[in-house]
Amino acid sequence: MKILRIIFAIVIIALSSYGLITDTLGSILPYALLSMGLMLIVTGVVEFQKRKPVAFTTFLAAGFSLFVGINTF
């Protein structure tokens, strides 16, 4: 799970950097938000396994991020 979080974080940083450098952030944003949502889901699963109450908030943030990412296509 830790490897998945690192991979999603690298993808988010790469997409955001590419969008800022090439000034095409509007077309890159949905993909970055979808990656962010997937990373938050993985983080939520890890926190849920540790029985931490922050897992619920992480799942809510993941849902919102995925919702916005899908609706911006």
Image (cartoon, grey):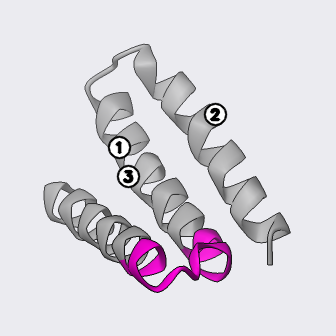
**Outermost residue toward the right?**
71
Local SS, label 1? helix
Q: Amino acid at mark 2?
A: Leu
Residue positioned 51% across, 68% down in the render: 32
**What residue does disc 1 label?**
43
Residue 8's x, y, as percent?
Answer: 32, 66
Q: Main secondary structure of the magenta part?
A: helix
Magenta stretch holds residue 8 = no
Left or right of residue 2, residue 65 in this image: right
User: What residue is pinned by disc 3?
Assistant: 42
| Alpha-carbon span between mark 1 and mark 2 | 12 Å
Q: Is residue 26 magenta?
A: yes
| Tags 1 and 3 touching, CB below 8 Å | yes
Q: Is 49 drawn above or below residue 66 in the view shown?
A: above
Q: Position of residue 16 (x, y in %)?
A: 42, 69
Q: Residues within 10 Å of mark 2 (few under 14, many from 20)?
A: some
* Residue highlighted by disc 2: 60
Q: How many discs appear?
A: 3
Amino acid marked by disc 1: Thr
Q: Read off the magenta span.
A: 18-31
The one of 42 and 24 positioned closer to us in this rendering: 24
Q: Is residue 17 left or right of residue 37?
A: left
